Image (spheres, rainbow, N blue to C red):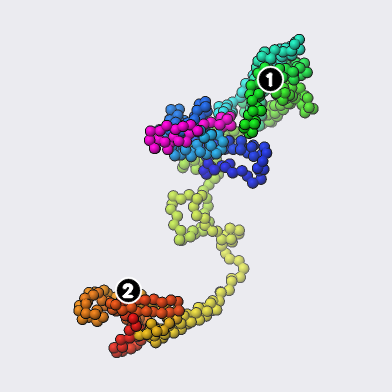
Amino acid sequence: MKGDELHEELPDDLPNEGSGTDAWQRLSAYAYLSAPERLEYVAVMRVFCGTLLADLAVPDVLAKLAQAGLPGNPGDPGAPGAALDAETLTARLEQLVRWGNLLRSTHTVTASSIAEYQRSRSRYQLSKLGERVQRDADEVLAGADAAREVSSELLTLVDRGLRDIAAMAAAPGGADPQQALERISTLFVQFAEFAESVRDFYAYLGQVLARYDLDGAEYQGFKELLLDYVEAITEDVSFRAPRIAAHLRAIWPHLPAVLSRIDAHAAGLGALSGALSDALPQTRVQRSRGRDLADWEGLRDWFADSDGHGSQVDQLRDATLRALQSLLANAKRMLRSASGEMSRRKDLLRLAAWFDAAEPEEAHDIAVAAFGLYGARHMGVAPDPDQTVPAYVSWWTGPVVDVPVALRERGSRAPRGRSAAVEDHGEQKRRLMEQAREQAAARQAAAAELRSASGRFDQVRLGSAAMRLLLELLTTALGNAQLHKGDKGDKGDGGDSDFLLDGAQAGDADLGIKLTAWRTPGRHTLLRSVDGDLTADDLTLVVESAAVSAAGETPAAEEASA
């Protein structure tokens, strides 16, 4: 993800206590709806929402996905989630647990093999917040763009129910708690459905009002919608609102007593709220609508102005008036248009259909004809010769070519101003030559030290430079040598047959030095230096002047002491 790490950590500016953290954690339950794998997440959540108090393992979810034919079915290669296997599904379930949509289950696992146990040991069940979020998401997907009909007949039922409750509350001895509970529960279900349908319809109406590209047919349908349907709704609400407000005023003095009698008769989870708060401090009880005084205050504010900010009925009238004003504005726009239409919406939709059905080459031609978007004009800037870019690489993802400032700003390659002077590197050359002379002198001194110490390496301690030169010559000599099996009487073999070295020599003509090495069983040559000592087993070393060897003279056998 990657999209799957979204909302895993709290932001730095969010307080870590109080309702802010709780709100953030609840909002994290919506994260899977905006993740790149949203289709897979929705399919998995629908599987869990289709069960009640059931915990499912990964194989169970895969089986239900295959049975329902939802995205994520591995047997359906055309599904968006065709690549969703057991391992990927496990990762999706774990992410849903972190977001709070699912909970881990403590169900005991029964397995016939280790592999089955590993697949089934993690079981998951739906959380309350996850079920609520998925239910809302399915409602949005099912009818987000539809025009919902207003349930105006429910307003009549609300009026009738409030009248009956007012009569029951004013009766001698008070209202019967069971009958009052049934009427109040029915009343608030009807009112909630009516208010929700009104909100959905006017939200759709606002979406249509935002369009200023209506053609003749669309304008005619919109006009009939406003003049007939909206007017009928407004008239019905205006007629019922005063009567409902009067019933509420009659009920209000008796309301606390009615609610108290209902709570004493059927407390429900409200009676357990104290015990739950003691055992589980984070558990809250949400009571049925109409059981709290706050629910009645919301019902009263919908039909009557109790706080000076206006009621929902007043807002409904204002919204209808704004809709009529928008209708008149569209009518004036269409009358001012010489052709009767100013919208290019149909033309753009037709062009979009051409683009959708065209091949890539045809789409380029359509774009050129419709918008004048011709091909790019290259400026002739050569790319980096060290970079080889294949022909199939898109310019969008390909390497960037640096454009000179003069060409980018003035469109000219000609340089401006005076040419810069050639940089003088004489000082740098002098320092490099001095450094080379110092290194050559140090190597000459190391070669002279080796020639003077030959034959008594165990008695003198060589300097660092002399030891490095000796090891360099020894490495080259051993690399040039040839190993062969010697006979009895050969030099250095002690009379026994053994392996000998031939041609183990190395020299440096510039330093005038040569090193010769041969194998001598039982001899240990000790090389001492300021950096440490080195012992060469079964080896004899001789360092001599290269000039003497070149003259054909036989060097003295200067060997290192054992």
The segment highlighted magenta reads 106-132
Residue 118 in the magenta stretch? The answer is yes
Q: Residue at x 53, y 31 (%)?
A: 126
Q: Nearer the viewer, mark 1 or mark 2?
A: 1
Give the residue at mark 2.
479
* Rendered image: mark on residue 263: 1
Q: Amino acid at mark 1?
A: Asp
Q: Residues within 10 Å of mark 2 (few under 14, many from 20)?
A: few
Quarter of the view holding residue 277? top right
> Within the image, what quadrant is residue 315 found in?
top right
- Mark 1 element type: helix
| Residue 136 locus on image (x, y percent) | 58, 29
Expressed as whole percent of the image width and height from the top left, the position of residue 409 reads: 61, 58
* Image spot of residue 486 (x, y percent): 22, 76
Can residue 313 be seen at all in this image of the molecule? Answer: no
Going 76% across and 19% down the picture, which residue do you hit? 252
Query: Separation of disc 1 and disc 2 at Cα?
Result: 103 Å
Task: Let me know if residue 107 is in the magenta part.
Answer: yes
Which residue does the image show at 64% across and 37% down from the upper left? 22
Position of 460 compared to 246: left or right?
left
In percent of the image, x 58 and y 58: which residue is there?
408
Q: Is residue 255 above or below residue 59?
A: above
Farthest top residue? Answer: 172
In this rendering, is residue 223 above or below 354? above
Dot 2 amino acid type: Gly
545 left or right of 96 in image: left
Q: How many marks?
A: 2
Residue 356 — which label?
A: none
Taking depth in this image into account, of 468 and 323 the one nearest to the observer is 468
* Percent position of residue 530, x then y: 45, 79
Q: Residues within 10 Å of mark 1 (few under 14, many from 20)?
A: some
